[in-house]
Image (cartoon, coloured by chain):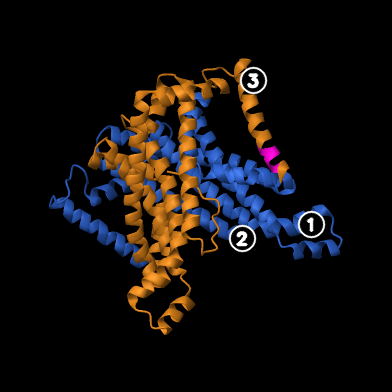
Amino acid sequence: MWIVRIVMIAIFLALVEVAVRTEILNPFFVPEPSSVLAGMASSVTDGDFLGMVAITLGAVLLAFAIAGIAGVLLGFVLWRVRPLGDAYEPLVAALFSSPIVLLYPIFLVIFGRNSAAIIALAALFAVLPTILFTKQALSAVNRTLLNVGRSLSMSSWNLFRHIMLPAAAPTIFTGLRIALTYVLIVVVAMEYILQIGGLGRLVAESALLFRATDLYVSVGLIVVISAAFIWLINQLERLAQR
Amino acid sequence: MKWVWALRLGAVLLFLGVWEVAARTGLVLDTVLPPATEVFGNIPTVAGRPSFGLDVYASLYEVFVGAAIGALIGFVIGAVMGSTAYLYKLLDPLVYYTGAVPKIVLFPILILFLGTGVESKVGIAAISAAFPIAVATALALREVKPIHVKAAKALGASQTQMYRFVYAPSVLGPVLGGVRLGLGVAITASLLAETKVANVGLGFRSIEYYSRLQISEMYALLLLVFMGAAVINLGLSALIRRATHYQQQQVGATATVA
């Protein structure tokens, strides 16, 4: 399947290449895909660029760690204390479907124009799916399993450790995967908007200089790196769920 | 169920109370967090400015025209993807992986093509909205129950009748769910793009207040934006429920991100 997909992408790029060379597409707007690919290839071995990637990934991992720990704990509380869950789960869901990213000026005011603001915003957004998935995972554990545990007179800790956790883990991991995806999106988007940090800044700066090839190179690299990142966490999730 | 609302109301009051006290006592600088009463008091001021109407109009235009274009693109891609099992398996991973890219980084490329006016924001809204709509459409088509298709064929339904009475009703709910998601990301994408390069619109105005250090006005405007987004989201959800009353559909937690 991947061969067909790669061939499809290659054909598309070849068509664009022809269109640009024959000036059907204005070369000022669209550079030749071959030169963009060459630029991307030389960037991935470039130390400066790898530093940018490291900055972005560092912010992503930090925000994810905050969101993951806080989200699982809060989700646990919402499950454990029924009234709180009933009252606040819909509120968390409502927040999750609201345009949280647009609040970024508030984060700039609080944290200043730096990566702390980006990390806080990404963590705030990603904590919401983690809470929801954790709460739902724990609520959805099969009653029969728990009854079996009780009839074996397991202690409540053992019940939690050996029945609740294994039963809820797959759904919690799905929540964490979604959280990680959102963290990546928010971090790169905000780096672009604020023109600070790593990968996103690269796009903002090349756009500012009106260098079309550089712009496409940086956008292309973000596409490739995001896809690789998502692929990696899918693999991790699959490993963790085995 | 009374205590559920009591808890919610309590949380809101506690939040507003802590906000007000923290700001009034100078615990938090009022250049960072103006008192809640001041922010709410500024809502009429912000909404009463002559520029506000134009900002709302520009943003709504970008969001709805963008989402409509995105829906058209999404329907076409989704219909192609969902038409056969092979195409679905072939194209789904491509859409999945490109869907996880922050679309806002395409904004500078759109500026090259469409300029710095509302058109580039319409473009970024359309691209962002197209993804969830395409995914929802393709998945919905794949999940049309074969038994319904067989039953209709056995009863001698024509191709048009198949589309009208089998496919359309069974994909309507999920597709509208995708549209709701698409509209959500269109709001985020276009307003976020406005904060980067624009000279009109709600996103532009919020960052304008920020750079002029009119922090209280900025909070008030963002509150208005959130209320507007919530109204659009709730309105669309209600419409979807009316349109698909025959389907037992579950609207889960759904996210909006650029």
> Hue of chain B?
orange
- Going by the numbered disc 1, the residue's amino acid type is Leu
Confirm or deny contact between disc 1 and disc 3 (CB under 8 A).
no
- Identify the residue shown where x is 54% and y is 60%: B249
Q: Is residue A182 left or right of residue B104?
A: right
In this rendering, which labeled residue sits more in front, label 1 or label 3? 3
Q: Which residue is drawn at 42% across and 26% down?
A: B47
| Helix, strand or loop under label 2 | helix
**Residue corresponding to mark 2:** A241
- Element type at mark 3: helix
Label 1: chain?
Answer: A
Above or below, B231 relative to B237: above
Magenta-span inclusion, residue B5: yes
Residue B62, quarter of the rendered image: top left
Please report the bounds of the magenta region as a residue range. Answer: B4-8
The chain coloured blue is A
Q: Could you give the CA–CA distance between mark 1 and mark 2, rounded to whole angstroms? A: 20 Å
Q: Inspect the image, locate mark 3, and give the three-letter code of the amino acid beneath it.
A: Val
Q: Residues within 10 Å of mark 3 (few under 14, many from 20)?
A: some
For residue A159, the mark is 1
Position of residue B97 in the picture relative to residue A75 (left or right): left
Q: Residue B219: x percent and y percent?
A: 49, 26
> How far apart, in angstroms, are the residues tagged by discs 1 and 3?
44 Å
> B147 or B77, which is in the foreground?
B147
Camera-side residue of A236 and B127? B127
Q: Is residue B83 above or below residue B206?
A: below
Query: Which residue in the structure is indicated by mark 3?
Result: B21
> Disc 1 or disc 2, which is closer to the eye?
1
Q: Residue at x 62, y 56 (%)?
A: A171
